[in-house]
Image: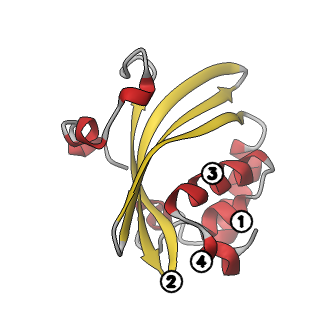
Amino acid sequence: MNERNFSTYSPSDLIVARSEAFARGDFGFIFDSYHSESNFRRQFPDRDDYLEFGKVSLGADYEITRCQILQEQESADEGQVIFLMEMKVQGAVQQFVELAWLHREENSWRYHRGQKVTQDEFPEDPQSLSFADFAKRDPSTIF
């Protein structure tokens, strides 16, 4: 998958494709899927710097074992996706639920920002989390 294929993705498709790219170490896809005005792009304005960072710092220590879409809503210019992510971080299994905001850029969805709920914060059934639950959370936790 590459940038010219982004136009075929729904917001949920892009979230799944990003997790698959992470699993295969395709940090270029991940970088390209970020919106140009995202905080991530402010932190990593140079693609090559991020590719090196991903290879050195992320590839060996993180493994995504599951990405499950829980809910999606979409308007003309913004998509929101709630998804459950399970990862192995340095061998330990961790789960979180994230609300991701995606904005359109160049006729394609791009990841703009997110808000995570860690495993100790979400209910026994994480599928019960809704957009309303995230609206109640502290907006300073949005990254």
Earlier-in-chain disc, 4 versus 1: 4
The residue at which mark 2 appears reads as 107
Determine whether label 4 and label 2 are within 8 Å by CB: yes
Q: How packed is label 2: few (under 14 Cα within 10 Å), some, or many (20 or more)?
A: few
Q: Earlier in the sequence, mark 4 or mark 2?
A: 4
- Disc 4 versus disc 1: nearer the observer: 4
Q: Which label number is shown at residue 28? A: 1
Q: Quadrant of residue 101?
A: bottom left
Task: Give the alpha-carbon distance from disc 2 to disc 3, as whole Å.
Answer: 19 Å
Q: Residues within 10 Å of mark 3 (few under 14, many from 20)?
A: some
**Helix, strand or loop for disc 1:** helix
- Residue type at tag 4: Ser
Label 3 vs 1, first from the N-terminus: 3
Which percent across, then down, holds residue 81? 44, 50
* Left or right of residue 17, residue 76 in this image: left
Q: Earlier in the sequence, mark 1 or mark 2?
A: 1
Mark 2 vs mark 3: which is more N-terminal? 3
Report the mark closest to the observer, 1 or 2.
Answer: 2
Disc 2 marks a residue whose amino acid type is: Asn
Q: Residue at x 44, y 29 (%)?
A: 127
Mark toward the viewer: 3 or 1: 3
Tell me the amino acid under the disc marked 3.
Val
